Image (cartoon, rainbow, N blue to C red):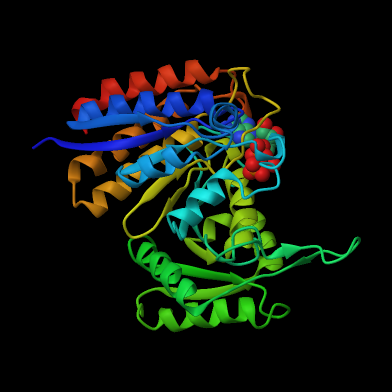
């Protein structure tokens, strides 16, 4: 049986127009190998959408996404937008909020053959995506960050039982499918009510998962543990801002920020998005590492496989992952991983591996 999906392509800014097409090309080759048909729908987003639609996230983009099975989102350089767009909620925050994509799942796994601070890291950070301490997106309307008088700025953090419970369940289910260890990260000694509630609710959910070992750390201590012994961690669950910072650290420790993928998911929708930003310092030079975006695409197919009980979609994910691992193991990598391949050379190597390995998957 052939399965088919309609997926959105939003290139975004900076290195987005280099890494997103690379991921689409690789996903297309892997889908073909697995017998999956993909109908790609390109939609405007970011700086180019400001030029054409006077907004970085046009209404037509949101409406089209609502009818798709998922999408690939490139990074955005929102600090480079003209006002009023620069001060508004950024495109990924807008899409996460609009579609209530409450779980941001960010694996950090080292690749055999690639240099890394920790060469045997294999962990996943599950970051709550809809509330917490990012005041630009933790309110229903308006923003929780404001300046009542010149020289005074106030930001609000929000943690709710309901949002913590749903993200905790995603994290525990994931831990159950992996090494059955879960670490709760908080700052309950200082942010007692808010992150204290986050810890308490996660511990309550833990009672439903007696087979999962649970520990917890303050966010500051956790940075030290990650640098010293990233290999000891399996699944980490935390609030929005802590998860954002910790996942950059975990990505870099396990290789490079350029290899750290993610998806943002609700029960019914998912968006593939690399953990890194738009890297304007290297944009347009054909040196960006496309791995994070490629593997984010793989995560989306894995998610589609689970959601639709579709083994073929899950196989697409495995084919992409194997292709990336094979290219890196054969000594081809971009300069952030110590290699000298360009974005296009690395992409070609993965496509070659995907095409050659197709029969074995
Ligand atoms: P944001 O706030 O949008 O997440 P950021 O400030 O975290 O962005 P990035 O754009 O992620 O910053 O870049 C941080 C550093 O990592 C830069 O030096 C950038 O060149 C590098 N970097 C990020 N992504 C990649 C990639 N895919 N390949 C190579 N280097 C990258």
* Residue at the left extreme, as displayed: 1
Quadrant in the picture for residue 211 = bottom left
Q: Position of residue 43 (x, y in %)?
A: 42, 32
Quadrant in the picture for residue 311 = top left
The residue sitting at 58% across, 18% down in the picture is 286
Location of the N terminus by quadrant is top left
Q: Is residue 248 left or right of residue 259?
A: right
Q: Where ligand 1 lies, by image quadrant?
A: top right
Q: Is residue 117 visible?
A: no
Location of the C terminus by quadrant is top left
The residue sitting at 22% across, 27% down in the picture is 33
The residue sitting at 21% across, 51% down in the picture is 308
Placement of 251 over or under 325, stated as above or below? below
The residue sitting at 72% across, 39% down in the picture is 83
Placement of 16 over or under 341, stated as above or below? below
Q: Nearer the viewer, residue 143 or 70?
A: 143
Q: Position of residue 92 (x, y in %)?
A: 54, 46
């Amino acid at each position: 049986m052939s399965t088919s999906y309609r997926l959105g392509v939003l290139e975004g800014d900076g290195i987005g127009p280099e890494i997103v097409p690379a991921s689409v090309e690789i996903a297309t080759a892997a889908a073909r190998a697995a017998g999956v048909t993909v109908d790609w729908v390109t939609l405007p987003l970011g700086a180019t959408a400001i030029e054409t639609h006077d907004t970085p996230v046009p209404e037509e983009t949101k409406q089209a996404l609502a009818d798709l099975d998922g999408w690939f989102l490139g990074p955005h350089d929102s600090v480079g937008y003209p006002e009023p767009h620069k001060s508004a909620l950024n495109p990924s925050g807008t899409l996460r909020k609009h579609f209530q994509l409450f779980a941001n799942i960010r694996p950090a796994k080292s690749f055999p053959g690639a240099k890394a601070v920790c060469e045997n890291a294999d962990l996943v950070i599950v970051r709550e995506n809809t509330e917490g301490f990012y005041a630009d997106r933790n309110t229903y309307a308006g923003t929780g960050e404001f300046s009542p008088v010149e020289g005074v700025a106030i930001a609000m953090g929000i943690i709710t039982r309901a949002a913590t419970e749903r993200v905790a369940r995603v994290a525990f289910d994931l831990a159950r499918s992996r090494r059955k260890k879960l670490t709760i990260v908080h700052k309950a000694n200082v942010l007692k009510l808010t992150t204290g509630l986050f810890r308490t609710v996660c511990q309550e959910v833990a009672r439903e998962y007696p087979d999962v070992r649970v520990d917890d750390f303050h966010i500051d201590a956790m940075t030290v543990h990650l640098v010293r012994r990233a290999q000891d961690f399996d699944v980490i669950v935390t609030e929005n801002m802590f998860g954002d910072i910790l996942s950059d650290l975990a990505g870099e420790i396990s290789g490079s920020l350029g290899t750290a993928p993610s998806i943002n998911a609700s029960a019914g929708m998912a968006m593939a998005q690399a953990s890194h930003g738009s890297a304007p310092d290297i944009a347009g030079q054909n040196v960006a590492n496309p791995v994070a975006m490629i593997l984010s695409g793989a995560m989306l197919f894995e998610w589609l496989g689970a959601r639709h009980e579709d083994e073929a979609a899950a196989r697409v994910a495995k084919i992409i992952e194997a292709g990336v691992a094979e290219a890196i193991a054969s000594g081809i990598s971009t300069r952030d991983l110590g290699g000298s391949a360009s974005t296009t050379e690395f992409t070609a190597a993965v496509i070659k591996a995907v095409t050659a390995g197709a029969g074995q998957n």
